[in-house]
Amino acid sequence: MRNPRFLFFSRYLNTTPFLGFKQNSRSLQTLAYEEVRANNDKPYKSTAFVLHGLLGSARNWRSFSKTLVSSLEKNSYSSDWRMVLVDMRNHGRSAEIKGLEPPNDLVNAANDLANLVKSEGWDWPDVVIGHSMGGKVALQYAESCARGDYGESATLPKQLWVLDSVPGDVNPEESDGEVEKVLQTLQSLPSEIPSRKWLVNHMMELGFSKSLSQWIGSNLKKSGDHETWAFDLQGAVDMFKSYRERSYWSLLENPPNGLQIAIVRAENSDRWSPGVVNRLESLASRRSKESEGKVSVHLLPKSGHWVHVDNPKGLLDIVAPNMVSTS
């Protein structure tokens, strides 16, 4: 049931410095975001960042985030949560922000999160939830934070949720190449699309599924008498290259003390090789040292890669009880 007390709001944070902090003698350029809270009448105590996947945006996660924060509120053991839904660089409203300097890779995508915290003067997030490419950005964020890249004030999140995102490098030969085909197709299209209907029909004629074609079409925005992309295509291509090349097995094998890394694998996802699954389950089953964090692996049944669409209730049943335990 929908709760009318939910607060949704969006902001652009383009040039606001935090306590005079500057990067390369320029004011911080930070991300567009939305907040979801269950009750604005009392202050929140815990924060979760929610990171979308390639070619997505914050709005993809509104519905699930609203349900999650409501579930956390109803549990008497939880604190008062807010969800910060981020438009990552080159995506959503952040694609219009000019000061997010290249290279467009996972390291800088994670740095953007730290700059957002500093610019707003927030406490560091307790939890980071990332889907697909966003899952690897979450891993990079934790790795950089543990290494001290964000300064002495930065604190590790208590928990990462990595949703259907393979933590190692991605071998193109071990995938069906659909993402590459989508990106190549989009690069071949004119920058001005006649209409959403035209795009969906064109994608389907090229052999893409109706659901995927419609989702791609949802990333268009009106510009005069035509449509343009709501993302920076070349920037997204660069980020996907970084996603494929980066590996975080070392982080999973030696998680920093106090950090829980929860990997959610969708049952029907085609992204998981038997070798990767076995390696993850071995890490999750080993006895952790007192000086190290923990890794857990969760199987989401009846779901493909789009976990928040295919089985949102199942995902909620996995995430919510374990987020309560961090508060």
Image: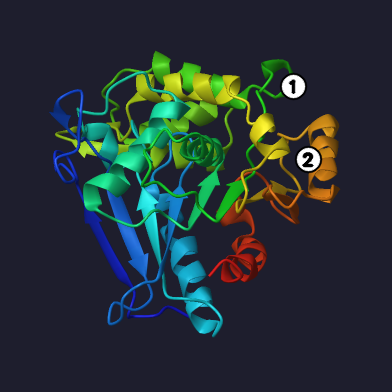
Q: Is residue 51 above or below residue 182?
A: below
List the residue tagged with mark 2: 280
Specify whether 211 is left or right of 65: right
Mark 2 or mark 1, which is nearer to you? 2
Specify whether 95 is left or right of 85: left
Mark 2 and mark 1 lie on one chain; the one further toward the N terminus is: 1
The circle on residue 174 is 1
What count of labels does the image hold? 2
Tag 2 secondary structure:
helix
Quadrant position of residue 95: top left
| Label 2: how many Cα within 10 Å (few below 14, some 14–19, many 20+) | many
- Residue at 58% across, 19% down: 245
Q: Residue 20 versus residue 112: which sits nearer the camera?
A: 20
Tag 1 secondary structure:
helix
Amino acid on which the number 2 mark rests in the picture: Leu
The circle on residue 11 is none
Q: Is residue 160 above or below residue 194?
A: below
User: Taking the image as drawn, is residue 307 in sight?
Assistant: yes
Q: Is residue 3 above or below residue 256?
A: below
Q: Residue 187 versus residue 232: which sits nearer the camera?
A: 232
* Residue 299 locus on image (x, y percent): 76, 53
Amino acid on which the number 1 mark rests in the picture: Glu
- Residue at 68% across, 30% down: 250
| Label 1: how many Cα within 10 Å (few below 14, some 14–19, many 20+) | few
* Residue 81 locus on image (x, y percent): 42, 70
Q: CA distance from mark 2 to mark 1?
A: 17 Å
